[in-house]
Image (tube, rainbow, N blue to C red):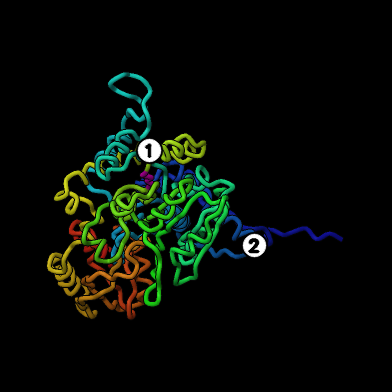
Amino acid sequence: MVTMPTAHDQPDYAQLPSITALLDAAERDERFHSYSKTQITNACRRAVEDGRSAIANGRSNTVDDPIGYYLSTAYGYLFYESLKAIRPVINATGIILHTGLGRSVLASSVADRVRDAAANYCNVELDLDSGLRGRRGDYAELLLRKLTGAEDALIVNNNAAATMLVLAALARDREVIVSRGQLIEIGGSYRLPDVMEAGGARLREVGTTNKTRLADYENAIGEATALIMRVHTSNYRIVGFAESPGIDELTALAHHHHHLISFDDLGSGALFDDALWTQQDEPTVESSLRAGADVVAFSGDKLLGGPQAGILLGKRDIIEDLRKHPMARALRVCKLTLAALEATLEIYLDADRRAKDIATLARLNESLAEMRPRAESFASFLKQEVPNAPIDVIDHQLSYAGGGSLPAQPLPTIVVTWRPNGSVDEFAKRLRTQGPTVICRIQDDALAFNFRTIRPEDVEPLKQAIMNLR
């Protein structure tokens, strides 16, 4: 005998609002004004479908205001999806080249150049003088040659790509000699041995983790050797009982064996022998080229302070071989990267201007005396806004260059700490997810705002973010 379901057993879908009713309500709700109609419609449909599923499975309770309830649910979907979109954030972490936050901040004049390139057609591959097809990146390469004295230059999309191109073009099916202490693994599972394999080269590691002598390289050279490679160790340093030949010694060894190429993978992009780098033993592009390295690779968005790019400098015939390799086409950069890099390199032509206008250099060079007024101003604001919470202004050594650069050198900084009345994790999340977006650290159960990376123009938006926590 089959029992027919009664009316009492049937799911009650009558409480579900129509999509049309939700869209009408969304038009009057300012929370939705920044979203397109398609986005809002999809979110409303998702909210109603989730409600329908909950009712069918007996998990739904009757709500007094279905329109308001499902509209808020739809907004929640839109809001949390929008958190995945790239948006400006206030970097209060003290890490200047924070990979998660996009590393270098471009100078305002550089951003203007990018904006112009984005909004218009550009002569990316057109020679305006002859009217014929030109070479992509020609002007940026010219600037690089002027600045460094390198015979030639080539630009690809990041330094990992630059390294891969060198290995594929100059050492495929041959050996590359690298110190065991430089076989790095950095963020995103970038492992040098794996890159070697992917580039078609064979790794020949020499020495020990802490000591590699020039004789170790010499003894490893054979008929299959193509490159002697030095690698920037990125996020770590081996100190104490350690030894490693400099690029000048490695280059001299490579050139003694006429068929070998000296390759310096610098990574961090410190361009000149400024005291800021040399006093901290940060290898520089200038010193590597002066030592005679055949090809040098470094990042555009680290200490150079420009856009993400991989920059290759070196001997003309070697760079030309790289330029002609089929992989170079797959690794080329777009017009926005070229516009940003050109404008950044133009700033470098003026030594006085670069220290002020390149945001990365400005943050690295700023003194405590310069950052203290804005730190104290923010602390005073906090004491007025949250009068019952402990607020402290602390001189600290908790700032770093980041991005694998200057890993052993903490930078002096000023930190404002706030112990909120409530969950510090919840306050940190609200600062991340409400506007303006603030990324700070939690230190000793307090929110820590590090003024090494909080720029003068960030202070007022930061105050607004605190007021929005009410």
Check the image and report above or below for 35 versus 68: above
Name the secondary structure under disc 2.
Answer: loop
- Answer above or below: position of 280 versus 30: below
Q: Is residue 182 left or right of residue 451?
A: right
Distance between mark 2 and mark 1 Cα atoms: 71 Å
Image quadrant in which you'd find residue 137: top left
Q: Is residue 451 left or right of residue 402?
A: left
Q: Residue 311 lies in magenta, yes or no?
A: yes
Q: Residue at x 42, y 49 (%)?
A: 255
Place of residue 145 in the rendered image (x, y in percent of width and height, measured from the top left) = 29, 40
Magenta segment, prevailing SS (helix, strand or loop): strand
Say whether residue 90 is left or right of residue 256.
Answer: left
Q: Which residue is mark 2?
A: 57
- Quadrant of residue 355 within the rendered picture: bottom left
Q: Residue at x 55, y 59 (%)?
A: 204
Q: Which residues are magenta?
A: 309-314
Residue 67 seen from this side: no
Seen as rendered, the residue at the extreme front is 256
| Residue that carries the numbered disc 1 in the rendered image | 316
Task: Report the amino acid beneath label 1.
Answer: Arg
Magenta region includes residue 113: no
